[in-house]
Image (cartoon, grey):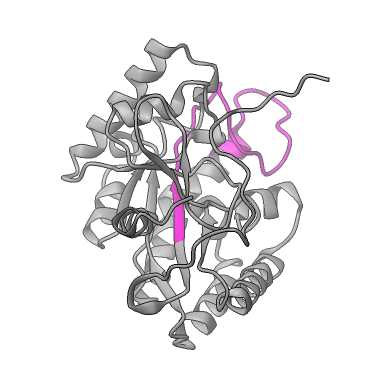
Amino acid sequence: MKHSDHGRYPYRSIQDRKDYSWPDGRRLAIYIGVNYEVFDFTEGLGAKLSPSQTSPDVLNTGWRDYGNRVGAWRLFDLFDDLDLRTTALLNSDVIQRCPGLAEACRDRGDELAAHGRTNAEAQGDMDRERESAMIADVTKAIETLGRKPTGWLGPWISESHETPELLVEHGYRYVLDWAHDDQPTRLRTAAGRLLSVPYSQEINDLPAIVGRHQEAEAFSAMIAAAVDQLLLESSRRPAVLGIALHPYIMGQAHRVPALAGVLKRIRGGGDPRIWWTTAGAIAEHVESIDAAV
């Protein structure tokens, strides 16, 4: 029987790795990845709160727009209160379509990572020339904010067979698309070094709340349980926990209190084993000590 394999990384169990620590001897790196996304009005991809009955889909369009107009700013207040810097996962079209939003991420000191052009499209079905041009356009747009992005999250976690090579060619150091591990791992590419930094598809409000119809309290309990378990294992190995948020989901007024509660409990506990950081800082540290498998 023939088996297909992507060839991007070999199998290696979590127990068969060299040990290392995060800065200052910490053992669990936690970052918050906030997805700032824009969509098209009458066509293209888009998460749905409720099935659309007609086109144009005013219901879901307005719900998604709420995240950029209101929800993101509510989350900024929470992060400011907790003195947390996040990884801002930016659709580059946000810069033109939501004036001031990307700039607010930059000005509060968040890492600016690339998240494609818009979440109305997925890059996995693009040919090489079109995908390369899209990555170049996204990179150039984010650079207008004064920072060159070094990390990439594909819209809808979509990749073509050549995406990793194209990212390396355009100067990216890490990618968040592969949710296969609790530690950063090295991806094989024909173009050079590329790191996979863990980005959770479980501790992620979109599949949890929209996909599985849970609510903020259940999602927040998932965050707490994940932190507790990873800290329990931390004497044996370091780990990364990425908490993935979308302002149109977790930025809703009725959901923020539960999120605030769990983050304040974990953050306020002052556990010396936890490193509150960004995805880019995780990649930089791993590269500096050459720790990725």
Q: Is residue 87 above or below residue 169?
A: below
Residue at x 83% of width, y 20% of height: 1
User: Is 29 or 61 nearer to us in this picture?
Assistant: 29
State yes or no: residue 276 in magenta. Answer: no
Q: Is residue 144 above or below residue 219?
A: above
Percent coordinates x, y for residue 92 in the rendering? 34, 35
Q: Is residue 271 above or below residue 112?
A: below
Point out the residue furthest to the right here: 1
Point out the residue furthest to the bottom here: 269
Residue at x 76% of width, y 51% of height: 212
- Does 110 sit left or right of 183 as displayed? left
Percent coordinates x, y for residue 119 in the rendering? 49, 33
Percent coordinates x, y for residue 106 in the rendering? 24, 54
> Dividing the picture into quarters, in which one does residue 70 lie?
bottom left
- Does 107 sit left or right of 260 as displayed? left
Residue at x 67% of width, y 73% of height: 225
Percent coordinates x, y for residue 236 in the rendering? 58, 74
* Secondary structure mainly formed by the magenta segment: loop
Residue at x 34% of width, y 65% of height: 85
State yes or no: residue 57 in magenta. Answer: yes
> Dividing the picture into quarters, in which one does residue 166 lie?
top left
Query: Could you tell me how many numbered marks the image carries?
Result: 0
> Dividing the picture into quarters, in which one does residue 96 lie?
top left
User: Is 285 or 127 nearer to us in this picture?
Assistant: 285
- Does 88 sit left or right of 35 as displayed? left
Q: Is residue 274 above or below residue 286?
A: below
Q: Which residues are magenta?
A: 32-61
